[in-house]
Image (spheres, rainbow, N blue to C red):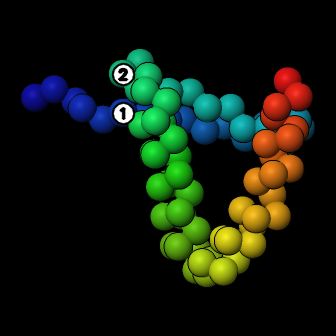
Amino acid sequence: MEDNKKTIVLKFNTEEHTIDMNFSPDLTDEMEIGYILSSSFLSFAAHQGVSKEVLHDIIDDQYSEFLSQNSED
């Protein structure tokens, strides 16, 4: 039977405070990658007991800053 699992490996660099992401060769669709990463984050947050209000505040406080920092590249 063919293995249909697509994978994303995350590695946190503690010195640079960066996250490196490696994708399996069959994971090339950016929409699919975004869906997997988003749903993984939300699932993890829910498992940790983070409320929707706290998630909203995190996104509201950080998202614009993240976009501005990454658009300068």
Residue type at mark 2 is: Asp
41, above or below 58, in the image: above
15, above or below 63, in the image: above
Q: Secondary structure at mark 2?
A: loop
Q: Residue at x 81, y 46 (%)?
A: 66
| Residue that numbered label 2 is attached to | 26
Q: Marks 1 and 2, how far apart in space?
A: 7 Å
Is 70 on the left-hand or right-hand side of 3? right
Question: Residue 39: which numbered mark, if any?
Answer: none
Image coordinates for residue 65, horizontal then vertical, percent: 86, 50
Q: Residue at x 43, y 27 (%)?
A: 29
Residue 25 shows in the view: yes
Q: Tell me if mark 1 has few (under 14), some (14-19) or many (20+) residues whose alpha carbon lies within 10 angstroms of its own.
A: few
Image coordinates for residue 40, horizontal then vertical, percent: 49, 54
| Res 7 quadrant in image | top left
Residue type at mark 1 is: Lys
Question: Residue 6: which numbered mark, if any?
Answer: 1
Q: Are marks 1 and 2 in contact (CB under 8 Å)?
A: yes
Q: Nearer the viewer, residue 66 or 43?
A: 66
Q: Residue at x 86, y 41 (%)?
A: 68
Q: Residue at x 76, y 65 (%)?
A: 60
Image coordinates for residue 54, horizontal then vertical, percent: 70, 77
